[in-house]
Amino acid sequence: MTGRFRPRLAAWPIDPVVRKLRSLTPLPEAEEAFVRSLSERRERFAPGEELIPEGQPARRPRFVVAGWAACQRVLPDGRRQIFRLILPGDHFGFCDRAAPPSPWSVVALTALETVDAEAALDAVLDERTPALGQAMAAAAAQEQQLLLDHMVRLGQQTAYERVAHFLLELQRRLHVAGLGDNQRFPLPLTQEILADALGLSIVHVNRTLQQLRKERLIELRSGVAILLQPDVLAEVAHYEPGPAVRAPSPARRQLEKTSA
Amino acid sequence: MTGRFRPRLAAWPIDPVVRKLRSLTPLPEAEEAFVRSLSERRERFAPGEELIPEGQPARRPRFVVAGWAACQRVLPDGRRQIFRLILPGDHFGFCDRAAPPSPWSVVALTALETVDAEAALDAVLDERTPALGQAMAAAAAQEQQLLLDHMVRLGQQTAYERVAHFLLELQRRLHVAGLGDNQRFPLPLTQEILADALGLSIVHVNRTLQQLRKERLIELRSGVAILLQPDVLAEVAHYEPGPAVRAPSPARRQLEKTSA
DNA sequence: CGTTGTGTTGAGCCGAATCAACCCCGGTGG
DNA sequence: CCACCGGGGTTGATTCGGCTCAACACAACG
């Protein structure tokens, strides 16, 4: 949140969105073109800006094409819990349920660029775009999974495991979005953000990261993380990537309203 | 899990389901009758039985009319995290997303009686049952909220707060289902279940409960919990009931695929 | 050049886990 | 009828992971 917000002149490519959706379901030419056509209706946000204030009606759903955001809740006494990080390729604002009182807020962690996703959502029930519909449903399912994974981290894992596990998850998600490779990826987060996501104190996040560095499992330099030994890391974190999320059968898709 | 499973002869009334849905959206006569007509297709489970084993394709969605269940994940090393408790009036099995590999399992905590919910789900997109559709959507939204509330407990609250907060939530949910009153409610859980839900050790749950009893905030006797001073309890737990979940606008309902 | 935000480090404390008994109770079977 | 058994609850002693408080380093920025 330091650092001036310097608006980028050129628009970011929409590739992260396409890549993510393709990773969930193969998209035929026509449907991929459809997604690319969403590139209009861009919107940008400065770091720290609230995209969806808690308690406000939701905005139209959007895809993130560049930058990071967080879905969080802030308690009256200042504590906050980050529920999930929103990365390039991810979407947010998909439900206006709880019209006035949204039970969470979404805030930009870095400079952020988004495109409108309403059309993609309409495609879910549109029979002319079956693959896209599948992909969107699978994306929702995957998101649910990530939420539960996060809950397991918070409830069952030690600080050491949490940090390692979280880094592995980020690497994987960013990789499908086309950011980073098998061990290197951008990590534009302060340790405070990590702390609020993982339910730890800043100081302890710091020490944990140091331990991981000392053990030569990771490396952190200027917003870039490197997993030096991803396999070892996955071992100690009990990380199981889990098979790619499968899309629900089309017949049931319309029934997915959330939940177990 | 001790005690023999003694099947009940008479069927439990479906009221908890009706009451819960009505609490979300007023149901016209006809639609309430429709819900009551679901009473056929009953299924019963013994305590400990797995309703949805992890990794298996999901069963048809069901409403619980009596008994408690848990939605959980068990880690390879034996640790487990309970994501949510499923109470009378609640539903489960709503998504078969991730067809083969379900990322969680559902297990009966007590003797359980359920009815088929497929028809109610079909009603969501059926224009002849608008109120029921709203109610089901609101139920899904509420469930999402409870999940996030639980995440805040795990990530931000102390053991003392967690237990108090959780008890208040249970009281509230059971109350709308018609079980218990403003301070008394059935609590057929072992301390081990509580521990796995709240991310604490059994011993510490025990001590925390004892402290709450010593402070005359709660009372526990043979499967029944009494909140002696609900207001004080809500204070210390930072519990804010939150206004009743509002149903999303019908126009957007079909778009709700989960998520933020 | 001060300021502010972020990362780093040390000292000390405390909440919660662990380990290990023990009790109580209902059920079971000799 | 009683002895045994197992599950759940309770308790104490001890350890330890993680928090708090506090100070300092460093860089970017105004």
Image (tube, coloured by chain):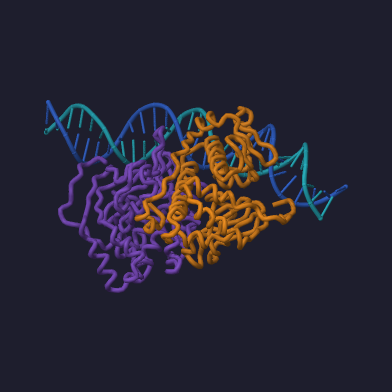
Chain colours: A orange, B purple, C blue, D cyan
- Whole-percent x, y for residue A61 in the image: 53, 61
Q: Is residue B41 left or right of residue A219?
A: left
- Whole-percent x, y for residue B126 in the image: 33, 67
Q: Is residue A57 left or right of residue B108?
A: right
Snapshot quadrant of residue B128: bottom left
Front position in the image: B104 or B164: B104
- Whole-percent x, y for residue C12 in the image: 63, 35
Q: Is residue B229 left or right of residue B222?
A: right
Please give the count of numbered marks on the rendered protein.
0
Q: Is residue B160 visible?
A: no
Q: Is residue D1 above or below residue A143?
A: above
Q: Residue at x 61, y 59 (%)?
A: A50
Q: Is residue B34 above or below residue A218?
A: below
Front position in the image: D23 or A183: A183
Q: Residue furthest front?
A: A29
Q: Residue at x 72, y 51 (%)?
A: A2
Q: Is residue B130 above or below residue A66?
A: below
Front position in the image: A115 or A140: A115
Q: Is residue A118 visible?
A: yes
